[in-house]
Image (cartoon, rainbow, N blue to C red):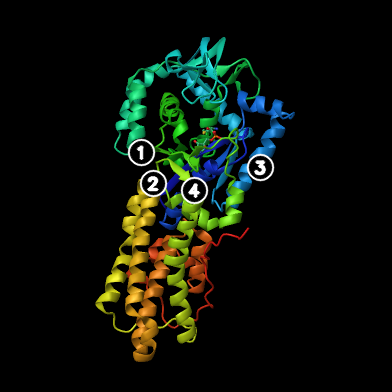
């Protein structure tokens, strides 16, 4: 294995009862951006996504569709895999909880928890929501039209059955210590406080098995019981790292995970239950759980029943893949809720991409192609104006990295685009088209400086827009092994004298089709 530092990032594994929509695409995309960034920044990355295929909800959905559970799982899991590929995600593994490797991991974790006296057999009597696959205390429920509902709005049913319990109540202090650990954080801060107060409010032991359905992983030694789908689902993160072989190179290298990326709906499972299960099994909990916000569609909650589910395949067809990737990562402060709005998307495409970056690249590179015989000119003496804009682009990496380290993906783009705007002001102010006649040597320096800015910006935008950034770097004839972040800064300036490809516009304007 390489001596590079390790970075392990995961998406939630998605339920196969629903077709993939923009919310799922968003989480996977954010992880892809972070994974790509880390690879370019010298890390050995493992990026995991997949599908959550067990439980009562999936069993019921399959029955309603007239399929066996595994038929439904095979079909929908494939659709999630296609979505990840279609969005150009660079995952290293795609896990399905119906795989044998996962069954072994779950049963090993269960056995370890039993050996550590963390699980006991008793009887559960309480509320359960199949939609949320969650148990709720009476005090958490509200009443709508005389019916009890969960905080999520899902309906609940009364369950009374024999069940194994996990001693969650014993882990309050350890969890609170874990949240306060220096490197271990649940982000953003508001979510961390939410989780802390939930734990401070007192934890009850958690029912971790059911006897009323069959579709899941049997409890070792008592197959009347099926493991609670969340203990099964969360374990996927360890399965993919090689658990139960904790001595394997992969496990030693990648565990504990650096980031479990999740939507805000499932923070409790990841930041309370999961670290408690792990600590109870003498395994290190994750270094970070990041909970991002929720997308709405033109102000409305996205839901199948409202009929406003945004199909990522369709919006990519319409707006372009890198355009959608850029919009989703740029428009909303990462962690906040966001609204999917067509006009906002068109504005971003036309202003940030077509005008700011696209025009700058197209104008400067085609001037080089036409006026310098298609060969990258060398720079003459740099003026203060050249040095100023070069210094701005040279200083980007640490700023971008600082934002990425706290998953502020939108802010990382803001600082890059500040330099793109500065470069536009520079280019317009230097008027290279006028210099063509009056001072061709100076024109060459201005074009060279602009091309160097484009080189660095294109290297930095690879995580967000892999195809478009590659096109820019291809035009500049930057070899594939010179596109890492170690190539940023003043030490690796563009070489003059290199023949370029004829520049083609990389960021077209979005023009609405006339009806
Ligand atoms: O919860 N906006 O799976 P799930 C933003 N199987 N993100 C959204 C979204 C929206 N409108 N809708 C969905 C599960 N998401 C479990 C997870 S993990 C061990 C098990 C994203 O199919 C967001 O990441 O319901 C959310 O947490 C996830 O999809 C829920 O996917």
Q: Position of residue 244 (x, y in %)?
A: 53, 32
Residue with the mark numbered 3 = 78
Gap in angstroms between the C-alphas marked 2 and 4: 15 Å
Q: What residue sits right under mark 2 in the picture?
A: 333
Query: Disc 1 to disc 2, how far (Cα)?
Result: 11 Å
Q: Is residue 33 above or below residue 122?
A: below
Disc 1 or disc 4, which is closer to the eye? 4
Q: Mark 1 — residue? A: 188
Distance of mark 1 from mark 3, alpha carbons?
32 Å
Q: For residue 240, which numbered disc appears in the image?
A: none
Name, please, the residue furthest toward the left: 384
Q: Which residue is mark 4?
A: 341
**First in sequence: mark 3 or mark 4?**
3
Q: Earlier in the sequence, mark 1 or mark 2?
A: 1
Residue 498: where, in percent of width, then height?
A: 47, 81
Choose mark 1 or mark 3, whichever is in front: 1
Q: Are marks 2 and 4 in contact (CB under 8 Å)?
A: no
**N-terminal label among 1 and 4:** 1
Around disc 4, counting alpha carbons within 10 Å, would you say few (fewer than 14), some (14 to 19), or many (20 or more)? Answer: few
Q: Is residue 393 above or below residue 10?
A: below
Q: Residues under labels 3 and 4: Cα distance?
A: 28 Å
Of marks 2 and 4, the one in the foreground: 4
Q: Earlier in the sequence, mark 2 or mark 4?
A: 2
The residue drawn where x is 43% and y is 61% is 352
Q: Picture coordinates of residue 403 (x, y %)?
A: 34, 50
Mark sitting earlier along the chain (1/3): 3
């Amino acid at each position: 294995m390489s001596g590079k530092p390790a970075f392990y990032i995961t998406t939630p594994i998605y339920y196969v009862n629903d077709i993939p929509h923009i919310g799922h695409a968003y989480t996977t995309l954010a992880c892809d951006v972070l994974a790509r960034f880390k690879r370019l920044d010298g890390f050995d990355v493992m990026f995991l996504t997949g599908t959550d295929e067990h439980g009562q909800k999936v069993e019921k959905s399959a029955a309603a569709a007239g399929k066996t559970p595994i038929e439904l799982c095979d079909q929908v899991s494939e659709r999630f895999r296609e979505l990840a590929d279609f969005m150009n995600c660079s995952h290293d593994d795609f896990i399905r909880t119906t795989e044998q490797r996962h069954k072994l991991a779950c049963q090993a974790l269960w056995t370890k928890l039993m050996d550590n006296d963390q699980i006991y057999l008793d009887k559960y009597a309480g509320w359960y929501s199949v939609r949320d696959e969650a148990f709720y205390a009476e005090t958490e429920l509200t009443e709508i039209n005389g019916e009890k509902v969960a905080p999520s709005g899902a309906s609940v049913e009364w369950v009374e059955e024999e069940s194994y319990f996990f001693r969650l109540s014993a882990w309050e202090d350890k969890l609170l210590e874990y949240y306060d650990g220096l490197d271990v954080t649940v982000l953003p801060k508001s979510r961390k406080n939410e989780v802390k107060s939930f734990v401070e409010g007192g934890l009850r032991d958690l029912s971790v098995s059911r006897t009323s359905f069959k579709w899941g992983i049997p409890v070792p030694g008592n197959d009347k019981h099926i493991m609670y789908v969340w203990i099964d689902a969360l374990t996927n993160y360890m399965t993919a790292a090689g658990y139960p072989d904790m001595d394997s190179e992969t496990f030693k290298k990648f565990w504990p995970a650096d980031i479990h990326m999740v939507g805000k709906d499932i923070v409790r499972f990841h930041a309370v239950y999961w670290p408690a299960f792990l600590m109870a099994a003498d395994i290190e909990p994750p270094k970070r759980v990041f909970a991002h916000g929720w997308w709405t569609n033109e102000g409305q909650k996205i839901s199948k029943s409202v009929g406003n589910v945004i199909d990522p395949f369709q919006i990519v067809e319409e707006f372009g893949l890198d355009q959608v990737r850029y919009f989703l990562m740029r428009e909303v402060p990462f962690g906040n809720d966001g609204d999917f709005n067509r006009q906002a998307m068109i504005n971003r495409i036309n202003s940030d991409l077509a005008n700011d970056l696209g025009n700058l690249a197209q104008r400067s590179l085609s001037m080089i192609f036409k006026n310098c015989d298609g060969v990258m000119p060398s720079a003459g003496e740099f003026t203060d104006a050249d040095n100023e804009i070069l210094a701005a682009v040279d200083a980007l990496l640490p700023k971008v990295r600082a934002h990425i380290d706290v998953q502020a993906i939108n802010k990382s783009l803001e600082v890059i685009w500040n330099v793109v705007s500065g470069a536009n002001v520079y280019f317009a102010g230097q008027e290279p088209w006028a210099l063509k006649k009056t001072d061709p040597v100076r024109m060459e320096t201005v074009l060279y400086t602009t091309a160097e800015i484009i080189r660095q910006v294109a290297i930095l935008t690879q995580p967000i827009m892999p195809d478009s950034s590659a096109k820019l770097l291809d035009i500049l004839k930057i070899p594939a092994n010179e596109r890492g972040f170690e190539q940023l800064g003043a030490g690796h300036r563009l070489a003059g004298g290199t023949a370029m490809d004829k520049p083609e516009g990389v960021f077209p304007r979005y023009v609405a089709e006339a009806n």
